[in-house]
Every structure is written in structure tokens, then in C-alpha cells.
Image (spheres, rainbow, N blue to C red):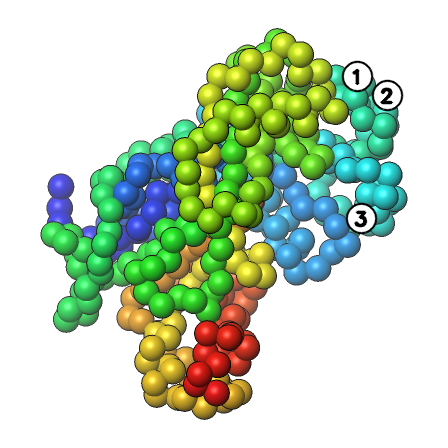
Amino acid sequence: MSSTYDTIIIGAGIAGASSAYFLSRKGHKVLVLDKNGIASGGSGAAGAFVSPKIGKGGPLQSLTNEAFVFAKDFYLSYFPQCYHQSGVVRIPKDEEDAKKFAEYEPYNENSYTNWDIAALKAHHINVPFESFFFDEAGACDAPETCKAMLEDIEYIQKEVIELKFEDGIWKVDEFQAKAIVLATGYKNDLFDMRYMGVKGTWGTRGDFRSQLPMEVSMHQSMSVSANMNGIIRLGATHEKSVKEPKPCEDEQALSLKVKASSMVDTSDMELVKTFCGMRAGSKDYFPLVGKVIDVPAMLETYPAIVRGAKPELKYIDNLYICNGLGGRGFVFGPLMGKMLAECIDDKKNLDDRVNPDRLFLKWCRKSPELDHLR
């Protein structure tokens, strides 16, 4: 194994795997490092549903649905063994939510049909609300997808404690590279990146053995996968009160079975395995893809920035991030990886919707952490 690379990526979840895949396709010699293993955190615990976002339009819905089209085509073209295109039924949560679906319908940009109660019952779904069925949607096998994307890329299970930049080269112990990509999830303590506001949401997923002939996946207030080789996946939960990773709890997975019983017959479901992990999201729910600002240098050089000054931004040399994909990691991952690779290799300007720069000046003006400088 070589010790010199074009790019070292820290983190082997879907963000890191996607970044590695697209950089490798551009000819980069890539090394991926992760302290716990491939898809060992939030990505491994994800339900990994790949479906559109519904709502009344807007930039986040547009970006999500662009990413959905890219992701499902990407998985079908390159990793069809990891993508189960079952279609996904989006079900209103209650009567009030059902009224909103009529308002959402004009903004459905992707292939769909309306399913009435009879159509739902024909697919073993017992809910009293008409729903949207997105036929091109589906679910990934989360860990297998990440492993497949990294199959031809060098990977080492290793914790990164410190990064050093010397003579234009990044050094990670015995390894060195021209560029570093941080795909570290909710943990971002290698540099000062407070302005990005990355936060973790704990999630638990349960895989259940069942004979229920579920041919489609569905989402209401939780997700239920199609029956894939005798296994139905339930979850994952969204537990914002959990701040640090903890052991997986079967009780949490079993609570999902109780919740799912309002949609489908769960009577024969037997818990096979519980997965858990921390998903990383940004403060505005958009992904974070691009360069990393040198926060200490900016605050020291331009102290008036905390009072509204707008100086030219200074970045840390050849340091990038791909993070904050939230609960839609397997939707956003491929497109964000492609965008990052084009930023690094082709010097292409980033989409403003995902560029972390969008958050910096507001953080400088508004963050209580900087009150002592105002």
C-alpha cells in the first residue's frame, strides 16, 4: 500500500464513499480512513430509502428531487445489486396532513400515481388516506452500497486524531495527500467548523423476519421497506435528545414494530438485528459540500466581521467537506460526491445551495459564541 495519495477522505459513510467513488473516477488516487469501519455510523443504521421529497416546492425540495433522480439512476446503472426499486408509498400522517397532500400534488416533479384506499389494501397497507406512489423510488442496502462503492478504493480502519499541513502537503501519520475531504458525520472537531452547525440525530433501525408479501416500501411517520428476501426494515427513529452514540437497543427497534402496526400486519415479524447510529445534518437542512473557511484567521484578520463586515473569505488550503446529508443520505450522497469531485478536480464553482460559505457571515453576526468579540 502506498503512503502518498491525491486525496485522503476521512469517513466511510455514504458521504465519504460517494466522494471517494467520484474522485476515483476522475483519476484521483484515493485513501479512505474510518475509525469504526465502512458504514459504521448513521449510514449503516439508515433505512436508506431513495425517494422524492413532497411539499409546496422551494429550493430544498428541488435539490432533493434533483438528487433523487441522479441517485436512483446511479444505483441502477452501477450498483443494481444494492438497490431495490420497490417504489415508495408516501402516506399522510393524519387527516390534517391528508388535506395538505392536495396542496403538495402540483409540486410532485417525479413519476407518481395516486393510490386510493383500495389500492393500498391490495398491497397490504391498512391506512384510511389516499396516498402518492412513486414508482421509481426504493431502498438501498446501506452497508453493502457503501462497501460496493469503495470496492476498488484503498480503505483502512483508522482513527484520525490530528492532521498536519506541511509544504503544501497534508499528513495523516504515515500517509500524505494533496487534499483532505472531511466526511466525518456529526463529529467535526479536527478544525473550527462551528459556522456549519453540524448536528447529530440518533437513529435506530430494526430488520425483521416476516412472510408478509410486501412488494412496495412506504413512509408515513416512519418507514417500512418492502419484503426483501424475507426481511422487512423498519425505521429509522429520529432521537434528537441523544447527543453521543450509545449501544443499540432492541427495545427501540421493537417500538418501531408497534408503530408500524398501524400501517401493516406486523404479527409475524421477528426482530433479526438492530442497527443504530448518528446521522449528521446541517442547521438549514441543506448538505454541506465544498471548501472549509479558516475561521481563526478570518476572526483575527477581520475583527469587524462580527459586526457585519463582508471581507473576502480565506480558506484552509486543499481542505474540503462533504457532510450534513441528514436523513436522506442515500438520496443526496451520489450527487454531492459528484459535485465535490468537480469542485476539487475541475475547479468548478459549487452550487450555492450546498456551499458551506452560505452559513459563515450569518454565524459571525449572530452566534452567541462570538458575543465577546462584538
Q: Is residue 70 above or below residue 221?
A: below
Secondary structure at numbered mark 3: helix
Q: Quadrant of the N terminus?
A: top left
Secondary structure at numbered mark 1: helix
Q: Residues within 10 Å of mark 3 (few under 14, many from 20)?
A: some
Residue 60 rendering spot, x and y as whole percentages = 64, 57
Residue pointed to by mark 3? 104
What residue is drawn where x is 34% and y is 77%? 296
Q: Is residue 268 above or below residue 288?
A: above
* Three-letter code for the amino acid on which mark 3 is drawn: Tyr
Secondary structure at numbered mark 2: helix
- Distance from disc 2 to disc 3, alpha carbons, whole Å, reads 22 Å
Instruction: Tell which of 213 and 208 is nearer to you.
Output: 208
- Distance from disc 1 to disc 3, alpha carbons, whole Å, reads 24 Å
What residue is drawn where x is 80% and y is 34%? 131
Residue pointed to by mark 2? 118
* Left or right, residue 346 beside residue 119: left
Instruction: Tell which of 206 and 7 is nearer to you.
Output: 206
Please tell me in which quadrant of the rendered image residue 97 appears: top right
Q: Decide: marks 2, 3 in contact (CB < 8 A)?
A: no
Residue 354 rendering spot, x and y as whole percentages = 52, 62
* Three-letter code for the amino acid on which mark 1 is drawn: Ala
Instruction: Tell which of 39 and 71 is nearer to you.
Output: 39
Instruction: Tell which of 151 and 40 is nearer to you.
Output: 40
